[in-house]
Amino acid sequence: MHTVTRDFTWTVTAALVVCATVGALTIPVVVGQRGGSADEVAQVLAGAIDIHVHSDPDNVPRSLDGIEAAKLARSKGMRGIVLKNHYDPTAGLAYLARKEAPGLEVFGGIDLNLTVGGMNAAAVEHLTQVAGGWGRVVWMSTFDAENQVRFSKESRPFVSVARGGTLLPETKAVIAAIAKHRLVLATGHVSAVEGLMLLREARAQRVEHMVVTHAMNAPVLMDVPQMQEAAKLGAFIEFVGGSLAAADAQARMDRFADAIRKVGVQSCILSSDLGQKANALPPDGFAAFLLAMRARGFSAQDLDRMTKENPARLLELR
């Protein structure tokens, strides 16, 4: 079976790496990507939930493992994280991370790529049976999504969610499993049009928790009217910070800020999409993203809505 070993989140071409210690935990840190004073960072991270954290074990280099990610998030005063892996379910990792970082809300999920059988309702059912019940998010395929493979101009097997403008029966079966277990449907790397098809079907099947995965990033590339429609269907729209050291970072932040204002903060979630080896550690990069949004005029109340209240609603936290 063919798997892809790349990562589409922005990377840093040159950075100074030092080590930080959290309790007995020592983690390499990329300097220059945090932004803001220590007080400002602490303020924006307190009580925040990051729904998009990559970690080891994985098949590509990561900056920290899932337990380290949880310990670090707790040390920063965050409320919770969601551990994502493109090819392996993370409910078990979330279970272990919770034991090592008590008090932190840690969730996992499953990404419906080829390694788990694609649109596989049985895999979603199994996710709900893993000890602890912390498997919460179902990504509707990412690197193996048909849209991703075509966007990347590759010739290899892929996972389809629809054919001829109609969702496949196996896709509808996955959505039924999501509805049955009150899971989160995340659209993954499907196209903007496919994403809206998924949301319409999910709403028809009474799925209550939905999010458009990094809506403005390639290969999704939703425009504002599509994001507005997704929000009307009941989905949150995710915006990911990635690396603010990338050449296009400031222009990207400007585009995100404009779109968020047009969609409305009540329908948006900010997350990091970090954990890559050369990038800032997830909490540091997340804080830099939030401070960049604050610099673009979003109030503390706006940021709280997009990093605390909306993620909590998505994950069904009280």
Image (cartoon, rainbow, N blue to C red):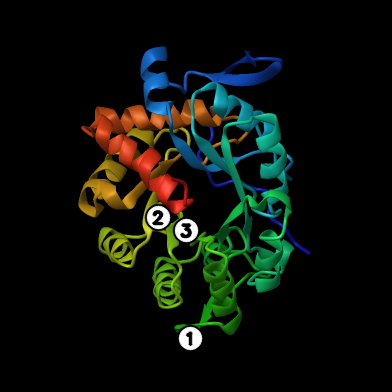
> Which residue carries the number 3 mark?
219
Cα separation between marks 1 and 2: 23 Å
Near mark 1 (Cα within 10 A), the count class, few <14, some 14-19 or many ≥20, is few
Nearer mark to the viewer, of 2 and 3: 2
Assign a secondary structure to mark 1. loop
Near mark 3 (Cα within 10 A), the count class, few <14, some 14-19 or many ≥20, is many
**At label 1, which amino acid type do we have?**
Gly
In the image, farthest residue toward the right: 1
Assign a secondary structure to mark 2. loop
Name the residue nearer the viewer: 186 or 252.
186
> Which residue carries the number 1 mark?
164
- Quick one: quadrant of the C terminus? top left
Cα separation between marks 2 and 3: 9 Å
Which residue is at a point 23% across and 45% down the rendered structure image? 258
**Visible residue check, residue 251:** no
Name the spot of residue 311 as percent of width and height, x first: 42, 46
Quarter holding residue 105: top right
N-term mark: 1 or 2: 1
- Quick one: quadrant of the N terminus? bottom right
User: Would residue 205 appear left or right of 292 to someone viewing this image?
Assistant: right
User: Would residue 213 appear left or right of 275 to someone viewing this image?
Assistant: left
**At label 3, which amino acid type do we have?**
Pro
Which residue is at a point 34% across and 63% down the rendered structure image? 234
Assign a secondary structure to mark 3. loop
Name the residue nearer the viewer: 242 or 106.
106
N-term mark: 1 or 3: 1
